[in-house]
Image: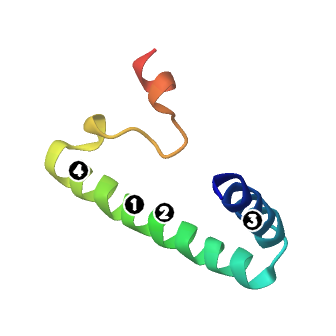
Amino acid sequence: MTEETRIALEYWVEKSKTDPVVLERAEQVRDKIEREAETKRNAIAAVLGSSGVRSASTSPKQASA
């Protein structure tokens, strides 16, 4: 049963990668996440100033290096 479930999930994931409805929804979710992250970055910048906020293009590894 577990193996059948795994195979079915793998099939669904592969099929979903080319489904235009799924891709559009994924893009909408990604955009929402980016807007929320920008809002939070701006709030932190307002409190701490720009020196307390990494740029969006700076990864945590780059910022700590």
Labels 2 and 1 touching (C-beta < 8 A) = yes
Q: Nearer the viewer, residue 42 or 64?
A: 64
Labels 4 and 2 touching (C-beta < 8 A) = no
Q: Could you say where residue 56 lies in the image, as x and y percent from the top left?
A: 49, 46
Inspect the image, locate mark 3, and give the three-letter code of the amino acid beneath it: Ala
Labels 3 and 1 touching (C-beta < 8 A) = no
Q: Nearer the viewer, residue 1 or 20?
A: 1
Label for residue 38? 1
Label for residue 6? none
Q: Which mark sits nearer the N-terminus, 3 or 4?
A: 3
Label 3, secondary structure: give it. Answer: helix
Nearer to us: label 2 or label 1: 2
Q: How far apart, in angstroms, are the residues tagged by discs 2 and 3?
A: 31 Å
- In the picture of the structure, the residue carrying the numbered disc 2 is 34
Inspect the image, locate mark 2, and give the three-letter code of the amino acid beneath it: Glu
Q: Nearer the viewer, residue 15 or 1?
A: 1
Q: How far apart, in angstroms, are the residues tagged by discs 2 and 1?
A: 6 Å
Count of numbered badges drawn on the protein: 4
Label for residue 44? 4
Label 4, secondary structure: give it. Answer: helix
Q: Residue at x 17, y 43 (%)?
A: 48
Q: How far apart, in angstroms, are the residues tagged by discs 3 and 4?
A: 43 Å
Nearer to us: label 4 or label 2: 2
Q: From the viewer's perspective, is residue 29 above or below residue 60? A: below
Q: How far apart, in angstroms, are the residues tagged by discs 4 and 2?
A: 15 Å
Q: Residue at x 54, y 72 (%)?
A: 29
Q: Which mark sits nearer the N-terminus, 4 or 2?
A: 2
Q: How far apart, in angstroms, are the residues tagged by discs 3 and 1?
A: 37 Å
Task: State the image quarter where residue 2 is shown.
Answer: bottom right
Task: State the image quarter where residue 50 is shown.
Answer: top left
- In the picture of the structure, the residue carrying the numbered disc 3 is 8
Q: Quick one: quadrant of the N terminus?
A: bottom right
